[in-house]
Image (cartoon, coloured by chain):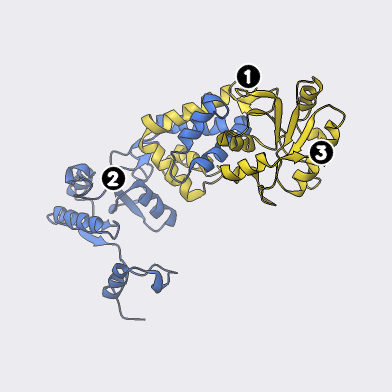
Chain colours: A blue, B yellow
Amino acid sequence: MMGGGDVERLIQLLSRLPGLGPRSARRAALTLLRAPQTRLIPLAQAMEQAAHSVRTCSVCGTLDSSDPCSICADPSRDHSLICVVETVGDLWALERSRLHPGTYQVLGGVLSALSGIGPEDLNTASLLARVSSGEVREVILALGATVEGASTAHWLQEKLAAHDVAITRVGHGVPIGGALDVLDDGTLAAALSARRPAQ
Amino acid sequence: MMGGGDVERLIQLLSRLPGLGPRSARRAALTLLRAPQTRLIPLAQAMEQAAHSVRTCSVCGTLDSSDPCSICADPSRDHSLICVVETVGDLWALERSRLHPGTYQVLGGVLSALSGIGPEDLNTASLLARVSSGEVREVILALGATVEGASTAHWLQEKLAAHDVAITRVGHGVPIGGALDVLDDGTLAAALSARRPAQ
């Protein structure tokens, strides 16, 4: 046993984090234990604080320390433009890009017969409520380019068809800065079919 | 800002851990925030607990939730055999191998003119006290096969020369330029069993 039960338990819990294996969990634990006042206790307190404050936004479904979240509560965002994403991580990626001026809807997953995820498991009730209010002009479907993402997009499109709202999908194709010869056939097919006149 | 200040702060502190960059810190934070009761709070509590309980062993210098540590307090260990290592991580590596029946001395570093680490910065006082007590028959120097490790071993050898104690060094098997805590058990076993009297 290394360092007594408390150290073992810390290493064990750290090693469950994605991206940390047993070895890096031990390194992380040592780093923390060597500086209890400046590293270990601040991190523990940040975790306790987050556990108490962070909740699911009742409007869009993201994780935030306030409800409605800081995006949904921001009057400078375009609330008539909703970007539908699968996960909170996807929302964070778009926020880092600062490219989306509107708000979001986090589904919390995509339809998947294999994983047993049906329409009732997705966070869509508040999306339909927002669209029904008539204040939404466009819904951007920014779901993954997978079979599940595509079928979820198709299903959402049908659900929203009755409303007076534009429904768009993010473009699929060759990533900027990416080389063609590393791409799979599906991406190449999408890139070819999305071709436009060169300028 | 992603998820409000509390989420930002959690990600920022996680990203300072060795082995976690910004991207994996975000993934780790999401994993924790999605399961506050089963993952986030238990980890926070394990950290608080470790911060309160873990201290430096006054005998050997390792980190443990008791003092003397669980190794120094274990009557089944061979207290006449002390293995000198550079770091707590090195001690953990040897403990995982279950190859060393004795106790340890954690120096907390090696002599290094470049890093400004002198003899007074190393945890050697308790080693000399233990050896002076006459109850130690062998000191194994298990320092890294680096210039600093070798010069530290040489310096320790001179300090211990006046005492009636065998001084050995771990043998071939430690790769030149390598650190102990990345080695596999087989290499550690070879190094331990090939130990020879220091020259």
* Residue A138 shows up from this direction: no
Residue B142 relative to residue A37: left or right: right
Quarter of the image where one finds residue A62: top left
In the figure, A128 relative to A7: above or below?
Answer: below
Disc 1, SS? loop
Residue at 70% from the left image edge and 22% from the top image edge: B58
Q: Chain of mark 2?
A: A
Q: Chain of mark 1?
A: B
Q: Amino acid at mark 2?
A: Gly
| Quadrant assignment for the N terminus of chain A | top right
- Residue B100: image location, x then y, percent: 63, 32
Disc 3, SS? loop
For label 1, the crowd category at 10 Å Cα-Cα, with few meaning under 14, some 14 to 19 and many 20 or more, is some
- Residue B25: image location, x then y, percent: 48, 45
Residue B109 relative to residue A142: left or right: right
Disc 2, SS? loop
* Comparing labels 1 and 2, the label whose residue is closer to the camera: 1
- Residue B16: image location, x then y, percent: 56, 43
User: How far apart are the two marked residues, 1 and 3, measured between alpha carbons?
Assistant: 30 Å
Residue A44 relative to residue B99: left or right: left
In the figure, A75 relative to B103: above or below?
Answer: below
Q: Amino acid at mark 3?
A: Gly
Query: Which disc, if any, is residue B118?
Result: 3
Residue ranking furthest to the right = B162
Query: Which disc, if any, is residue A108?
Result: 2
Q: Earlier in the sequence, mark 1 or mark 3?
A: 1
